[in-house]
Image: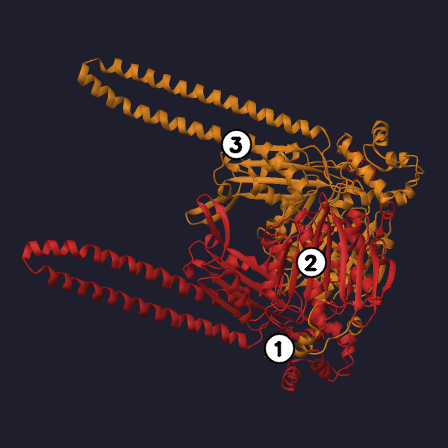
Chain colours: A red, B orange
Amino acid sequence: MADGKLEDKLAGKIVDAEELSKEFKEHSVAEFFKKNKQMLGLYGKVRTLTTVIHEYVTNSLDACEEANILPDIDVKIDELGSEYYEITIKDNGPGLTEETVGKALGKLLAGTKFHRMMQSRGQQGIGSSGCTMLSQMTTGKPIKVITGTGDGKTISLQLSIDPKRNEPKIANKKDLTKNFRGLAVQAKFKGVLYRDSEQGALEYLRRTAIANPHAQISFRDPAGQKITFKRTLNKVPERPKVVKPHPKGVTVDEIVTLAKYTDSRKVISFLKKDFDRMGQKSVESIGKKVQFDLNKDPRQLGWDEAEQLINAFKEVDFISPGGDALRPIGEAQVGKSLQSIVDPEFLTVLTRRPQVYAGGFPFQVEIAIAYGGKAGRTVSGAEGMEKRLEIMRFANRAPLLFDAGNCAITKSVHSIDWKRYDIKDVDKAPLTVLVNFVSVHIPYTGAGKQAIADEDEVIEEIRLALMQSGRKAGRYISGKRKEREKQLKRELFYKYIPEIVMALNELTGTDKKLLQKKLETMVLEKLRLDEAEEVEELEENSTEENKKGEDDEGKDKKAKGKK
Amino acid sequence: MADGKLEDKLAGKIVDAEELSKEFKEHSVAEFFKKNKQMLGLYGKVRTLTTVIHEYVTNSLDACEEANILPDIDVKIDELGSEYYEITIKDNGPGLTEETVGKALGKLLAGTKFHRMMQSRGQQGIGSSGCTMLSQMTTGKPIKVITGTGDGKTISLQLSIDPKRNEPKIANKKDLTKNFRGLAVQAKFKGVLYRDSEQGALEYLRRTAIANPHAQISFRDPAGQKITFKRTLNKVPERPKVVKPHPKGVTVDEIVTLAKYTDSRKVISFLKKDFDRMGQKSVESIGKKVQFDLNKDPRQLGWDEAEQLINAFKEVDFISPGGDALRPIGEAQVGKSLQSIVDPEFLTVLTRRPQVYAGGFPFQVEIAIAYGGKAGRTVSGAEGMEKRLEIMRFANRAPLLFDAGNCAITKSVHSIDWKRYDIKDVDKAPLTVLVNFVSVHIPYTGAGKQAIADEDEVIEEIRLALMQSGRKAGRYISGKRKEREKQLKRELFYKYIPEIVMALNELTGTDKKLLQKKLETMVLEKLRLDEAEEVEELEENSTEENKKGEDDEGKDKKAKGKK
């Protein structure tokens, strides 16, 4: 305890709790993000504009895929004045109904995605409403929206947000006669900047096209230049299934919460109905491990009993989460995209099997390593143009351009000992590493959705994928290096043959042609022996590597999960 | 527009907007952060535990200072099982009233800090409620609270959160007879880990003590070891003043919002009453620059008129924000703290004048550079123990231990060309750089409050401070280097004198002693000349540097602000 007298003397009168409590207030989530717009990634002039495009484009892609429509998205950026832009985005998705349009674009924490366990790009119900708020904060103007459901119901309206209540304000609503299916949004922003840079809107759309070959995206920049990223795949990705939590990743709290709201009357049926991969055999095995009767009413399930269930789950083998919950881009498509853009000397693509992490959320890692050709970023260095490592990060096919230093993907890449794969200085290698993290729930570090939290399970899985692909890349690179060394050796040997022939001829008088022939045979023999040794070495390594690979695979076959 | 036929054929039936709108739902901010606890910094086993300590300790310090009490804070961590801990924190602050305790610790986005423009460590009303939620999520248990206001009213209670409604649930409330002033919180957490590491609770408290010499903090770790960071300053920092927005940083949106809620009947009085540093002369000058009458009712102020005001503000000189809004640690205290902990060869401390950034928020940068001695982090490298650059980041005196890569402070430090200050490889220098960013509103990148967004004004100001201090450090370091070089030169010259004496003696027969003396005089003369040249050079540089310094100061005197 502090010395009361000292305080009185040195620090004046103490203010009491009653006095302080008068300043106690509540605030809405809209007020919170209005004051902290940097938490939505809406800071930095270039970054802000790219983030706005990101929010609208991901929403359009999600909407189209949910409705089973091949996405056609038009993006336009117009410069209205100094650091003053208008953004227009139009899609051919299902549109929004009159009832939902206000909340979807004008109320934070509202939407279709938060409560579902289904893979989608958006997951919070914050992003596009944040853009509406930014537009009114910087220009005083509402956004304009046209939405049509394709059955003749097309409306136009103006939309803004009342931050104090976190509620949409709709004005000028008009029924349009034209038949239109999709959503078009037009919004103005001040204090932002368009740049054709590594973190600009164009690069964002280019990467979106790489990861979404089924989407057609056209873009017109402020200078009027048009570019269209054409669709290369005429098939909408199958709608990912809404999944139940996987027992290997679920937490005690989630069991208790799920049990409170279940329709089942017994824990047995609750387990079978509300969890993924829970068969009769698993339930029987669980029943033997817990200290209570599984015929119990789940609504009566206490914390301790739920904890017993979790401990039992740990001892039971469950099949990995089903593939139909997750929709990766796919090895063939990733390969095709990178081949056409990067045109590398060597390319390896890998889509790992689904895993689960805390919360029972399935996730999956896709990876590509491209070496040589146009791989890597090109920067101007001390000795002209130089190559640098390029990491292309995606989450559920949406490109991540910012906050790289904080992201599980970047951390995983930098945690790998690339020297083992014959890449001496990875930062300066002509290397493009693409990672797509696919999940029902991406653990973003912030509401701005630009970096994935480095949870242990996430890091481990990305590392495994990198190592598996790294070994393949390493074999190519080391093969290339050895070929070059052999070539040098051969050239060296041949260079000295004529001199040795001359010398030997002078000493012994033996015929020059004979000497030449004999020496050539010797050199060839020597080179053959070297090669055989190398092949042997390589085979040994590769057996080891295969073994490692098999271990990985073996692990894959069972669901791994940590609490 | 997409080809409807193609879609039908290839991708099945289109799902319409009506169907999709059925899944539209709203969710509470508590549900949001429960599902995204990583956004509160509550991820990673060690990090989570440190973050919990951080939330409680900053709340205690804020409460004590607001009540004008010298803080005494006791922190205890008990290990209850594997990755299962209990945390107990007790302070001697003003306590919470029965009316506010529930919301303060059990409702997100509620508190005294969000709506005020006043410097404090907390600013969101999220942190400690997030800890309550984490406790119930991982252990199923409520937290225990004892709060006393020092006038005999002491209560104990158990507290948890209803996430669906974001409302506190209070149980077991009891009136205690014992007289107690302060707040004591006891909470249990699973899935966390205590480590005595660079990002552990002990290091967090050590840094808290560095930046808060008026606080006494005692800590007992899970092994029972006790450490007390003693108070070295018997004075509560003066309570920072609640400030009005500074005209140089305010936005159009803020003027419009303020005008809507003002009591003033004319824009003239609104300007004078609701803004910082707005005198009669400034208002008159503004009146000449805008196209409307300042006698207008502020409630009628339109966006365009507010924009005219902003443009007028830009052309008027305002005094910098007042110092009484900001409470830096102070150069003397920072120096004392670092001297005692780091004991460096060289130390320079600088507290810059307040500036403003977007939103009219005043901010101020404090900086210290320590070189040599125990400065820098010590790591075990390839050649034994090696030194690495250490960056100690603080925001309003609260240590920032995580997300360094994303923080404006780290980015500023790495953007400096340290070679100019005679530091060749800054990453491997025995250097500790302390930066305390003080503001009425810290632009944190996330709700976890561990990194400051790299807004232009923030980066610029930290860089200026670093350069100003860097020059001083550079002068010391280069002086030291030159002294060493001179010493080497002298030794080299003297080493060869005897040889030259011998040679000359043999050639000319001159007396050895005479030769020795003459040569020594020559060497001394040569060294003196070198030195004089260096001094001249140094003086030239330092004149230039002083000029630069003055320019900085000159800039400082006027408020700088960008929109």
Q: Position of residue A118 (x, y in %)?
A: 69, 71
Left or right: A278 in relation to B100 = left
Seen from the viewer's position, the closer of residues A480 and A333 is A333
Q: Quadrant of residue A101?
A: bottom right
The three-letter code of the residue at mark 3 reads Gly
Q: Looking at numbered disc 2 in the image, what kind of residue is underneath it?
A: Val
- Mark-to-mark CA distance, 3 and 2: 51 Å
Q: Residue at x 6, y 54 (%)?
A: A507
Badge 3 and badge 2 in a common chain: no
On the image, numbered disc 3 is attached to which residue? Answer: B474
Q: Which residue is mark 2?
A: A75
Q: Count how many numbered circles sit on residues in the image.
A: 3
Q: Nearer the viewer, mark 3 or mark 2?
A: 2
Marks 1 and 2 sit apart, C-alpha to C-alpha, by: 36 Å
Give x and y (percent) for residue B7.
68, 75
Q: Does residue A15 appear in the picture of this structure?
A: no
Which image quadrant is residue A187 in? bottom right
Q: Nearer the viewer, residue B161 or A82?
A: A82
Q: Is residue B489 left or right of residue B377?
A: left
Q: Which kind of residue does numbered mark 1 sit on?
A: Gly
